[in-house]
Image (tube, rainbow, N blue to C red):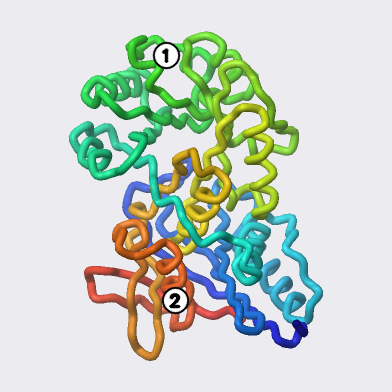
């Protein structure tokens, strides 16, 4: 197909976050990112580029500049989806994979719900979820005594679920040991893993050898010297594609993890509905036996909308199971054609994206 048959458009979105969303001690008021639409002949592909503040190595301004440069090159047949900026590499590789029909349509809409520590609320959510009962709880934000008490409370009140815990490298080794001390030994086997408990990798390794609590690598996976390998007490690696890079890079990490006997968990970085839907498709494709970590849509007050000829319809892939994940992605994808103004009826709030080029 001739390069002149190609068309690429980059849009920007800005979504209001719920109050209380904090990233490394900084409140996140809005989630800002880009949507990329590629058109080649009759085929179309979408991708999302959304660097995560405090976590991504690149800023949105840098990602925007790189995406616009790639867009111009791709339209004349010169571009490749190997940007050194992880968010750009991921978003463009998704758009290309869709355009070339390489990204499978089936999605894994299971989730490990984020838990606030309320067992009644968690019970309601898990009761409505099919299959494996899993939940995720952030620890390390308060004193280890409090964290241990909440974990004990949840596991004692609910007999079935396992918990994924995430400390985000918050603890010293002494505090991590203190957390383990306050856990009821009877519940430890129901902790699927504890993500990066300590400030350093070596401290986390030492911790994993002692209290019979498996750990998972998260931040470490994105560091240049990280090597996927089997280690005592290590159960999984967390793969956040928006922070890691292209679909091919993520696929290689999954394959390395499985070869080492580790689980690989596809996880979100506060993407919009479009990005979450594509992550669900990737999870179904690459890690079908593992529940992905994608329960972040509820942290946003609004989503981008489908806008066509004066009509709007919101994307509710996660809230409304009557929509297929792929159908939801397509409805959301076209959301980018519209003005940069808020639209919606007050029930399904949303934001249209503005065209950059």
Residue 272 placement (x, y as % from top left): 45, 61
- Looking at the figure, which quarter contains the N terminus? bottom right
Q: Nearer the viewer, mark 2 or mark 1?
A: 2
Choose top left, top right, bottom left or bottom right for residue 218: top right
Mark 1 surroundings within 10 Å by alpha-carbon count, few (fewer than 14), some (14 through 19), many (20 or more): many
Residue 124 placement (x, y as % from top left): 20, 40
Q: Which residue is mark 2?
A: 335
Mark 2 or mark 1: name the one nearer the start of the chain: 1
Residue 223 placement (x, y as % from top left): 69, 37
Looking at the image, residue 260 lies above or below residue 70: above
Visible residue check, residue 17: yes
Q: Residue at x 40, y 86 (%)?
A: 308
Furthest residue toward left:
120
Q: How many marks?
A: 2
Disc number for residue 180: 1
Disc number for residue 224: none
Mark 2 surroundings within 10 Å by alpha-carbon count, few (fewer than 14), some (14 through 19), many (20 or more): many
Q: Is residue 266 left or right of residue 116?
A: right
């Amino acid at each position: 197909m001739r390069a002149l048959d190609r068309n690429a458009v980059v849009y920007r979105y800005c979504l209001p976050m719920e109050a209380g969303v904090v990233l490394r001690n900084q409140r996140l008021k809005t989630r800002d990112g880009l949507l990329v639409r590629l058109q080649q002949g009759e085929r179309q592909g979408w991708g999302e580029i959304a660097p995560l503040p405090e976590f991504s190595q690149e800023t949105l301004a840098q990602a925007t500049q790189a995406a616009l440069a790639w867009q111009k090159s791709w339209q004349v047949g010169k571009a490749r989806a190997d940007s050194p900026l992880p968010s750009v590499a991921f978003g463009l590789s998704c758009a290309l994979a869709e355009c070339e029909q390489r990204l499978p349509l089936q999605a894994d809409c299971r989730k490990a719900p984020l838990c606030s520590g309320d067992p009644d609320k968690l019970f309601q959510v898990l009761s409505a979820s099919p299959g494996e009962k899993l939940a995720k709880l952030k620890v390390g934000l308060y004193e280890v005594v409090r964290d241990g008490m909440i974990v004990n409370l949840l596991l004692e009140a609910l007999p079935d679920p396992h918990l994924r815990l995430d400390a985000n490298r918050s603890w010293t080794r002494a505090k991590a040991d203190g957390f383990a001390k306050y856990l009821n030994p009877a519940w430890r086997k129901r902790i699927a893993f504890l993500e990066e408990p300590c400030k350093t990798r070596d401290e986390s390794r030492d911790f994993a050898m002692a209290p019979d609590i498996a750990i998972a690598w998260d931040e470490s996976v994105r560091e240049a010297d990280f090597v996927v390998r089997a280690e005592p007490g290590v159960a999984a690696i967390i793969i956040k594609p928006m922070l890691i890079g292209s679909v091919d890079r993520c696929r290689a990490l999954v394959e390395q993890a499985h070869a080492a006997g580790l689980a690989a968990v596809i996880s979100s970085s506060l993407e919009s509905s479009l990005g979450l839907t594509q992550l669900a498709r990737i999870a179904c494709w690459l890690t079908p036996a593992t529940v992905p970590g994608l329960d972040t849509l509820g942290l946003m007050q609004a989503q981008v909308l489908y806008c066509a000829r004066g009509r709007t319809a919101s994307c509710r892939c996660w809230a409304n199971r009557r929509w297929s994940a792929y159908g939801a992605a397509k409805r959301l994808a076209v959301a980018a054609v519209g003005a940069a103004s808020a639209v919606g009826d007050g029930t399904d709030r949303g934001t249209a994206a503005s065209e950059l080029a």
